[in-house]
Amino acid sequence: MQEKLRSHIEEVVLLTNDEFSLIYSLFTAKQFKKKEFLIQEGEKVKYAYFVVSGLLKLTHTDDSGKTHIISFAMEDWWESDFPAYFNQTKATMSLQCLEDTNVLCLSLENYQKLCSDLQKMQSFFLKKANSGFIGSQKRIISLLTTNAKGRYDQLLKQYPTLFQRVPKTQLALYLGVSRETLSRLFS
Amino acid sequence: MQEKLRSHIEEVVLLTNDEFSLIYSLFTAKQFKKKEFLIQEGEKVKYAYFVVSGLLKLTHTDDSGKTHIISFAMEDWWESDFPAYFNQTKATMSLQCLEDTNVLCLSLENYQKLCSDLQKMQSFFLKKANSGFIGSQKRIISLLTTNAKGRYDQLLKQYPTLFQRVPKTQLALYLGVSRETLSRLFS
DNA sequence: CGCGCGATTGAGTAATTTCAAATCTAGTGG
DNA sequence: CCACTAGATTTGAAATTACTCAATCGCGCG
């Protein structure tokens, strides 16, 4: 649990033991069962989550009631409704377990404390924010330039394990096509 | 020029005069004419750009030769092929002027210098990276949940000036529909 | 065994694309 | 100032693609 977080951070910046215990003391560990919600649309967003193990989906429900998957979050991912988290507003997304999941929770207060007290952590979060931005932009390009079949292949290539872990229905919600169309891509 | 950058940064963190002159000394100013390229696919990406005035489009050309607009960059925006910039690899996107444009250029070296020498600047870039991430995620949601008409309305609402500044052809490339379909949305 | 969930298949419908042509507009040079 | 041209916009019609709705199939689990 601790080691998971530590080695994750140390892929970017090296830490002393003291530094890490300070850091770790600002997180709280929680467990969730499959189908449980970490965040529900309309509610306050207390935490950003570091996924130690398991699998989450970040979803958004549109006006017509259809839900779409914005992203999956697996081991070593950070996830939250970040707009709501940073601006302390109500969630417009939900975060829900696709598997039993262990997370480490970081409140905004503690996030800011980490950033201001430890230059290293600010630099770590900067790196993560940049990767997050780049990842999202890649997804935009994918949605603009590639048809469903291509996007499916890209997803499969990037996260081969997803396909044993979630039903195709969920993949369709991520890819932006109906499950029927997704199914027909293989015939 | 300077004032533009300074007030932009000071929306996030306050600076002393000394701090700002250090910061500004790490930028170089450049001008580009309409249709000129700041970045071309396949070439090295030397700079991230702060747009002082004018308008840019960040584009990507897919395998079939169609180009798509990933984002527009107007006054006060930061833009680059960030994956290529941060990883020092060849560009997979182009950055081109839709109007005559003034920018301030920041090399990766100087970006890193700013981050390590001035805590404030790291904190500024963290804030920017987070907004960039959130903005991209909003775009993903928009692409997944909303049809072309809806996306057009959202764009119009967010950047009313765009519509006097760029032809609808370009908007279609951004929205992910053919210009014919976009045209038909209004009849 | 029966239930529930997921996957597949079919048929009809709706939306979007593509290709083509006509029209309109702004900027250029004479 | 006008004629010309390149780019932008609109419109039409056919073809493609994806969606919806419905029914069926298959599998694992209680």
Image (cartoon, coloured by chain):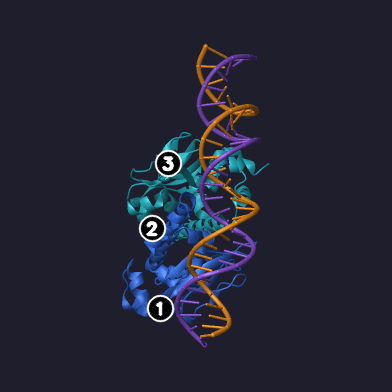
Chain colours: A blue, B cyan, C orange, D purple
Q: What label sits on residue A152 in the rendered view?
A: none
Q: Position of residue A20 (x, y in %)?
A: 36, 76
Instruction: Tell me which residue sits at (44%, 36%) in the image.
Output: B31
Q: Is residue D29 above or below residue B108?
A: below
Q: Is there CB contact under 8 Å for labels 1 and 2?
A: no
Residue closer to the observer: A54 or B126: A54
Q: Which residue is mark 3?
A: B65
> What amino acid type is highlighted by mark number 2?
Cys
Secondary structure at badge 2 equals: helix
Circle nearer the viewer, 1 or 2: 1
Q: Is residue A130 above or below residue B34?
A: below
Instruction: Tell me which residue sits at (46%, 67%) in the image.
Output: A72
Instruction: Tell me which residue sits at (38%, 55%) in the image.
Output: B114
Task: Return the chain for callout 2.
Answer: B
Q: Position of residue B132 (x, y in %)?
A: 49, 56
Residue C25 position by quadrant: top right
Q: Which residue is mark 1?
A: A24
Q: What label sits on residue B115 in the rendered view?
A: 2
